[in-house]
Amino acid sequence: MRASLHRRFTAPLAVLAASSFLLVGCSGGADPNDPNAGGGAGDVGTADGVVNVYGTINGDEATLLEKSWADWEKANDIDIKYTGDKEFEKQIGIKVQGGDTPDLAIFPQPGLLADTVASGKVQELPADALANVKEGWSEDWQKYGQVDGTQYGAPLMASVKGYVWYSPAKFAEWGVEVPKTYDDLVAVSKTIQEKTGSAPWCAGFNSGEASGWPGTDWIEDLVLREAGPDAYDKWVAGDTEFTDPDIKAAFDSVGTILQDPSMVNAGYGDVKSINSTAFGDVATNVANGSCALTHQASFFEGFLTAANNADGKPATVAEDGDVWAFLTPPMAEGDPAAVTGGGEFVAAFSNDDDTAKVQAYLASADWANSRVSLGGVISANKGLDPANAGSDLLKSAVEILQGTDTTFRFDGSDLMPKSVGSDSFWKGMVDWIDGTDTDSVLEEIQAGYTS
């Protein structure tokens, strides 16, 4: 979703790293404040001091977003009006077809951005925004916002996926260490199960219309680690089908945990309860110690700090705290660090001066440092000071994103066409957890390419 970082998340204010959604009123009729409402999105807009921005981010996270640009708004005499919509992925297409487009949209998936660019309504990045993108972002991040070599989207925020969250104190009590390989992870899980007599893992795939996305993150982690970055790239590009042995092998590896009733679903039920458990709700059991392990992105820290530990106090996330995290380990000890992640991209439907100024600012290191310093999120902008990140975990995540030795790959489902990445892949993961055999699920997901 996601998890690009913001496409699927709902959380309270204390949930610093969680992204959430609230329908503020932009998915209905044309916005009377939008100078382009009802007209073609490619028309030249009139700079009137108002720039409408539409995205998935909402609630408390939207409050921080608006705070991040507040000083810049005043200095530049531009009013940025933000609207968040939990149905963005569906509504953006409807808006484009109906001519009810915002000035700027924050896309949570490069694949969805590419689909929208095909409408002919998305503007190429203006000069100042393009300059900021080239200065602040790696070539890989630039490419995620491109379609056929043309830059349409400017990177915004980011997340590091594939963290396994655990209790350092409990690990010491059980006599287990952070695993160095995936086989070690499975072995540690079995040891915990034997020592506690209960399932060590908890997971939640429920996320409304986006249910299933946490499972796609699992599969992507294993494809990258088992088959390698080249195979991952071919799979994401659609050159390798889901029915390929490499992809099935990733499902089998994930299944050693998620489909084993002795491994899941700690505190929530059996394997099938994964589908009925909201992805953020598992933070409760991880924080209070009734769930030993869960797999989730860097944003999950905010859900944990909003939950209580076993003593009824707010949980702490630190190496010596209630909860800490390690990256899903490689298949063999010594393999290069491989990380999946996500992010958002800002694209324009208007080309007036005010819109161009806002888009350029959001692509800058100045904005990245402003937003990250407010807590809960990170960015891959090269001009971001890691010290501005709100916690040790987020600081380490920034360093991973900026590290030259890290093999980074963008969330695969976010790069795939919408009919697969945010449709058949999500649905396939739900069916897989419900008990549909792997071969049938892989065929079902692959069929999304022809739907």
Image: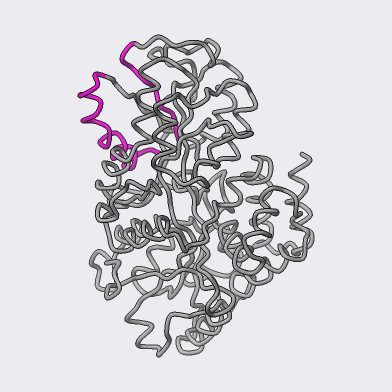
Q: Which of 321 and 222 is in front in this view?
A: 222
Q: Which of 198 and 410 is in front in this view?
A: 410
Q: Nearer the viewer, residue 366 or 438?
A: 366
Residue lying at 29% horizontally and 55% vertically, measured from the top left: 386
Q: Give the magenta range.
A: 48-77
Residue lying at 51% horizontally and 89% vertically, measured from the top left: 194
Magenta run includes residue 68: yes
Residue lying at 45% horizontally and 40% vertically, measured from the top left: 155
Residue lying at 78% horizontally and 47% vertically, measured from the top left: 447
Please identify the quadrant where the C terminus is shown: top right
Judge left or right: residue 25 versus residue 440.
left
Colour mode of the rendering? one colour
Q: Position of residue 216 (x, y in %)?
A: 60, 56
> On the image, which quarter does residue 175 sit in?
bottom left
In the rendered view, would you say 284 is above or below 91? below
Q: Where is residue 45 in the image (x, y as percent from the top left)?
A: 44, 11
In the rendered view, would you say 364 is above or below 400? above
Q: Where is residue 10 in the image (x, y as percent from the top left)?
A: 41, 47
In the rendered view, would you say 365 is above or below 124? below
Magenta run includes residue 446: no
Q: Nearer the viewer, residue 164 or 90?
A: 164
